[in-house]
Amino acid sequence: MDILLISSAVVSQDCSHHAAGSDQNFCYWVCGVGVFPDSSGSCFSSSRHLLLNEISFEMRGGEIMAVMATSEEEGTALLDLVAGLRVPVLGSILLNGQNVRANSLESRVAYVQNDLNLCKDMTVLQTMRYHYDLKKPTDKLGYLKIDAMDRINVLIEDLGLEQVKNTKVSSMTISEKRRLNVACHLILDTDIVVLDQPTRGMDIFDTFFLVEYLKQWANGGAGNALGRIVILTMHPPTYEIFTMLSRILLISAGRTMFSGRRRDMLPYFAMVEYPCPSYKNPSDYYLDLVTLDDLSAEAMLESSQRIEQLAEIFRQKQEPLSDPGPPSALPMTVKKSNFFIQAFVLFTKAMCYTQPVTFLNWLSLIVFSASISLVVGAIFWDVPGSDPQLELNDRQGYHYAVMCVMLWPLLLYLTVKELSRNKKTVERDISDGLYGRFTYVFTKSLVNLPPSIFIWMIYVVPSYSMSGLYMQSLNNYDGFYIYIGVMLLYLNCIQVLITASVYLLPYTRTMTILASAVASALSILSGYTLHVKDQPEYLQWMQYVNPASWLLPFLLNRELSPEAIQSSSGKILCQVKHQDIIVQLPCSSRNGTTILKHYGFHKPDKLFFNYDNPPVAMIGFYVVLSVVGCIVFTMNCCGRNKTTRIRGHNYINKP
């Protein structure tokens, strides 16, 4: 199958189309926070920047092209365009003689992005199987009935990863990670492969090996009689690697300095009176030649004039693009897994691929939660016995400590630390199209729910048992089970609240501060630290959305009920003077209503929303915050910023 890829751009403001058979055109505008089309070709504010201008090239099956740009953003933007991640404002891309759109390209191009945030807890074999299950290869070799593991093992061996196939990604070198990243996309077996800086951080030998393999990959194989197209951005290669390339695209200031076959590059620059000196690497020399020199005003003026001159010369001397010929069949597409398969693979990753790391993390959390619970239990040991007359306010202090103070280490570990640890890997997978945002957050919530409930149970059961508050009536342990149930519900509500807050912001420190501020505000306004009547009027509304404001009065009304006080104080003996004789009799019960009224927690006061039935309110709170968290994460509020950054200059051939 013959593959022809044509893309071009012109600088004219109207971007008018040429006649049939001539260059196809598009304009590409990049703004401060996104890529926005501007059909007029004008720039209405200083924040807009013309990133690509007068860029055109063509390729056929079996060729490998290197894109060398003075700015990394330009090379990445071009690959994004070829991979269908960006849409040109005007113009077209031809594939096999057909005008294709971005969605058609995205399903037919394997895009190896410059992102090495693979899951650190999986091995090479597991990582490739994980990618294979989420994105099925093209059906080009279906008739050969090659097993998935056979394909994976062949790629592992071909890319020199056999020795580390059972090694975790966290223990691999940069070169091994980059080759693994390439292997995860080559397994898709597409006819077009684009790679963004696949050799960055690799030594000369590994770079030579990888480029040589990509050249062989482009030359074809089973099912590819005419080969594949390979496009990669890279730093100036050595002369030996330079000779492996089929085509070169040299870009500076968004304009084409040279585009064509590699063997024509040196004769072209010699013709325009810029011959490569002897014993010089052509890729290094010509990239330096078209790089803006900002060391001085004179050097900047001279280099900018040279760049403008070379761009204009190439525009005039550029040969017309080849006739694509009659339209033919497009390459086969990659098959994405549906929602259920994606959810199952993510579940398998959490339960199998990332073990035993995940298990050890949960085990450490269990030990941590048990330790905190024992400390709280030791502090509030046997509250009914130590405070039978309700003078020390230990009951209120215990519940406030468990609900609002001592949970912070566990809460931050379960939310902020876990999300920040996995954030880059998740964003990398999502930008790679392995699964959707909603699929991830939905599956993650279900997977984390059982261990979270178990950890919170370890947190509340020992301390509550040691406090002795569960005997709320004689020989009746219902209070114990009611407390455990409502506390598990409450703690999960606070966890989902922090999770939703974390999803709002992309920066770890900022989102930690925000989440902590929100939870702290709710704790202070629960009615224990700051009396409800002393709270400012503009904060009164928080009583209606604060789980602590619902649950704390509910628990204290049970703990300070006449039955609960009588069941605990009946065991305590007090010295009473009776007929001039001091005897020990069961202590009289104190009235807990006075304490409840003092805090504003007494039932007739009705100061708290839905206070008589807090479990129902907390269930609604949990559902609403779960939906909000899913929506916020799905809307990519903390996602990968696909906007090309244009602040300053980033010249890849300068230190």
Image (spheres, helix red, strand yellow):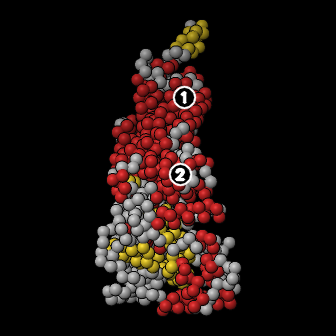
Within 10 Å of disc 2 (Cα), the crowding (few <14, some 14-19, many 20+) is few
Residue 214 visible at all: yes
Marks 2 and 1: CB-CB under 8 Å? Answer: no
Please say whether residue 415 is visible from this viewpoint.
Answer: no
Tag of residue 292: none
Q: Residues within 10 Å of mark 1 (few under 14, many from 20)?
A: many
**Residue at label 1?**
463
Whole-percent x, y for residue 403 in the image: 51, 38
Quadrant of res 434? bottom left
Instruction: Name the quadrant of the N terminus.
Output: bottom left
Real-space Cα separation, disc 2 to disc 1, in angstroms: 55 Å
Which residue is at 57% across, 42% downward? 409
The residue pinned by badge 2 equals 157
Judged left or right of residue 246, residue 88 is left
Q: Amino acid at mark 2?
A: Glu
Q: Residue at x 54, y 16 (%)?
A: 572
Vertical side of 61 occupied by 555: above or below = above
Residue 491 percent location from the top left of the image: 47, 39
- Residue 547's quadrant in the figure? top left
User: Which amino acid type is marked by label 1?
Assistant: Ser
Question: In percent of the image, x 47 and y 66: which residue is there?
Answer: 218
User: Quick check: 517 left or right of 492?
Assistant: right
Q: Mark 2: which secondary structure?
A: helix
